[in-house]
Amino acid sequence: MQASHFLTSHQKFPCTPHGLNPTHQYRFSPPSSTIRFPPQLRRPITSAVAAPSPPLLKHQKTHSMPSEKVEIFKSLENWATQNVLPLLKPVDQCWQPQSFLPDPSLPFADFTDQVRALRDMTAELPDEYFVVLVGDMITEDALPTYQTMINTLDGVRDETGASLNPWATWTRAWTAEENRHGDLLRTYLYLSGRVDMLSIEKTVQYLIGAGMDPGTENNPYLGFVYTSFQERATFVSHGNTARLAKEGGDPVLARICGTIASDERRHENAYAKIVEKLLEVDPTGAMLAIADMMRKKITMPAHLMYDGQDPRLFEHFSSVAQRLGVYTADDYADILEFLIGRWRLEKLEGLTGEGKRAQDFVCGLAPRIRKLQERADEKAKMMKPHGVRFSWIFNKEVALSD
């Protein structure tokens, strides 16, 4: 799950990438083809001054799905067994993190040679790339929160912790597959020597403790719309970190990020299939859910990210991702258009009047997002360059704009 590059919930488009709210203080154009290296500055991680608090949660609504609709998900259990569970891979067919990492069973000299080679490959990657990669890793590592969130959804939660219900089986196995992502990225970052693992570990603990507030309201209609969009976003994000790693001279890291992206795409396919089925059996209910989530904007999993120092950490991380082209406002609009096409929303029939209004809203939203981004880019050109220090890279400064 993951990925990672969206605005905070305090802004007009709370979890779309930077640039969608023209009233926000900073607006940044997509990155140039040249990646700049920030000055090698270092400051202490801790301070005698109390750190500011992380962002506050918005108002939370719960159990919004009418109780009778629980029966829809019960009636779809056989369908889920036949159409969703086959998208999981057996454990013995799954890749494991160790396949990409130095082999600790080797003699010490051989192992350290492999670590040295790994460090040599990461040497030319800029600090700003590591900000984005760390943000992705932290998002992946907060996996306990995501399993918890899915298990809040009425009608599909794991009622016992080991239920044989297909919805519960999917959630546990999906979690097990996703668990490899954070394990692999964290170990690679640890061995690279390029990042402050203590700060990263604190950020992970803060994030898991804070949880997430995606606005899904215990409602599986909303929850599966959310996960469809979110998994597509992480596929895009990891794919772009793979591209940048390859361009920066690290083919192993490129393969790691590309492999994770492939998992995310398969998981996206499962969640999108569920929404397709809901559109078939309850077109108005599903269409209203899609519109509801798009009005709220898709809040990505790490929106409560905090390192004990920067209360705007997620916003700043998102800005770097936008500037590097890892995840941008255009990507957000692209994902929306992709899902509109996949779900054939423009041709959806059998809707009530309210459903048709929701259909019109969703199908007309992407051009509006792009237009707002164009205005924001124009404003960004008039802004002075601005940078932020990230504790993850030893408080070095990284540019948020060119």
Image: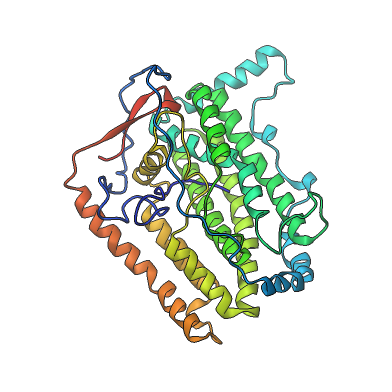
* Residue 114 against residue 86 in the figure, above or below: above
Say which residue appears at 23% left-offset and 58% top-offset: 375
How did the renderer colour the structure? rainbow
* Residue 332 against residue 385 in the figure, above or below: below
Is residue 349 rendered to the left or right of residue 364? right
Residue 285 lies, in percent from the top left, at: 57, 76
* Residue 51 against residue 173 in the figure, above or below: above
Say which residue appears at 48% left-offset and 81% top-offset: 354
* Residue 248 in view, yes or no: no
Is residue 40 rendered to the left or right of residue 243? left
Residue 80, image quadrant: bottom right
Of residue 178 and residue 151, the one placed in the foreground of this image is: 151
* Residue 32 against residue 40 in the figure, above or below: below
Residue, far left: 382
* Residue 299 in view, yes or no: yes
Residue 177 lies, in percent from the top left, at: 69, 46
| Image quarter in which the C terminus is found | top left
Residue 320 lies, in percent from the top left, at: 37, 40
Residue 266, image quadrant: bottom right
Of residue 240 and residue 335, the one placed in the foreground of this image is: 335
Say which residue appears at 75% left-offset and 56% top-offset: 168
Of residue 158 and residue 244, the one placed in the foreground of this image is: 158
Q: Report the number of discs.
A: 0
Residue 251 lies, in percent from the top left, at: 53, 36
Say which residue appears at 61% left-offset and 21% top-offset: 114
